[in-house]
Amino acid sequence: MCPQARRSDEGCCSLSREEILEALSGVFEEVLGRRVELGEATTAADVEGWDSIVQIMLILASEKRFGVRFGSTELAELANVGDFVTLVAAKQA
């Protein structure tokens, strides 16, 4: 279920970019065990400990948090956290 979700007429979750980014910060904290300052331009190179295993854990935790599924092609196209926010928003539209 989506955190602090607003329901649209269709009944699906509708979160703003800021709300998605805030929820992702919670996912990162849960997976990494510490608070991480995320911005739209943040990449794996900017976050200590964000390696390939953590990447998988972040994806799985995000799928659970937002109630969506991501395809491997979609994920391969992501360059930064902002792209991930855009993908989550599109999945919820």
Image (tube, rainbow, N blue to C red):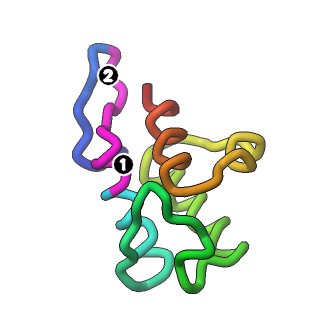
Q: Is residue 79 left or right of residue 85?
A: right
The answer to which image quadrant residue 74 occupies is: top right
The image position of residue 25, as x and y in percent, is 37, 65
Residue drawn at the location 31% of the way across and 58% of the way down: 22
Label disc, if present, on residue 20 of the rendered structure = 1
The image position of residue 4, as x and y in percent, is 22, 46
Q: Do residues under tags 2 and 1 come within 8 Å of each other at their CB atoms? A: no
Residue drawn at the location 59% of the way across and 84% of the way down: 49
What's the magenta region?
10-21
Residue drawn at the location 29% of the way across and 48% of the way down: 18
Label disc, if present, on residue 11 of the rendered structure = 2
Instruction: Look at label 2 and name its amino acid.
Output: Gly
Q: Mark 2 or mark 1: which comes first in sequence? A: 2
Depth check: 41 or 51 in front? Answer: 41
Label disc, if present, on residue 72 of the rendered structure = none
The image position of residue 12, as x and y in percent, is 36, 27
The image position of residue 37, as x and y in percent, is 36, 73
Q: Residue furthest top?
A: 9
- SS for callout 2: loop
Q: Does 81 appear in magenta?
A: no
Whole-angstrom CA distance, mark 2 to mark 1, is 18 Å
Instruction: Look at label 1 and name its amino acid.
Output: Ile
Residues packed near mark 1 inside 10 Å, few (<14), some (14 to 19) or many (20 plus): many
Q: Is residue 34 left or right of residue 59?
A: left
Depth check: 26 or 16 in front? Answer: 16
Camera-side mark, 2 or 1: 1
Residues packed near mark 2 inside 10 Å, few (<14), some (14 to 19) or many (20 plus): few
- SS for callout 1: helix
Q: Is residue 93 left or right of residue 69?
A: left
Q: Is residue 64 left or right of residue 19?
A: right
Instruction: Quarter of the image for the C terminus: give it.
Output: top left
